[in-house]
Image (cartoon, grey):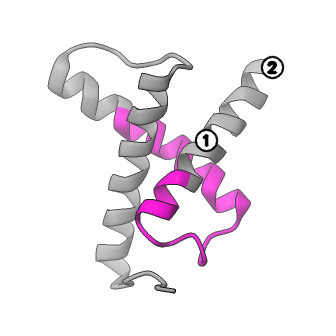
Amino acid sequence: MLDIILWILFGALAGWIASKIMKTDAEQGAIANIIVGILGAFIGGFLMQALTGQPTDTFSIGGLLVAILGAVVLLAIYKAITGRRGVTR
């Protein structure tokens, strides 16, 4: 049970940071940040393992950076498909 809670918190943090980087935070809510962060962790882990051959599957600063990278890639793909530019303030 604790692992699930940690994945949700980790995903929320990674998704929120990625949404700030990609300027989609105003469009997303907390649930979307969690989903983007968790999916981003999978994408980032896949990309890092493909590039380096090393798995990144730990709760660490490196794991968070990989999750953020994956979430940014996911949001960039989403923005490219939908044609959204993000909200500027």
Write the residue at 69% across / 67% down: 29
Badge 2 crowding class, 10 Å Cα cut-off, few under 14, some 14 to 19, many 20 or more, is few
Q: Secondary structure at mark 2?
A: helix
Q: How many marks?
A: 2
Which residue has dot 2 on it?
Answer: 2
Q: Residue furthest right?
A: 1
Q: Residue furthest front?
A: 89
Q: CA distance from mark 2 to mark 1?
A: 14 Å
Question: Main SS type for the magenta part?
Answer: helix
Using the image, tell me which numbered label, if any, was put on residue 11. Answer: 1
Relative to 62, 4 lies left or right: right
Q: Is residue 9 magenta?
A: no
CB under 8 Å between discs 2 and 1: no
Write the residue at 83% across / 20% down: 1
Q: Is residue 23 magenta?
A: yes
| Residue kind at label 1, given as amino acid type | Gly
* Image x and y of residue 48, in percent: 27, 28
Write the residue at 54% across / 44% down: 14
* Image x and y of residue 13, in percent: 62, 44
In the depicted structure, whether residue 33 falls above or below residue 46: below
In the depicted structure, whether residue 83 falls above or below residue 3: below
| Residue kind at label 2, given as amino acid type | Leu
In the depicted structure, whether residue 18 falls above or below residue 55: below
Q: Nearer the viewer, residue 68 or 82?
A: 68
Considering only order in the chain, which callout, 1 or 2, is on the residue closer to the N terminus?
Answer: 2
Q: Which residues are magenta?
A: 17-44
Relative to 81, 50 lies left or right: left
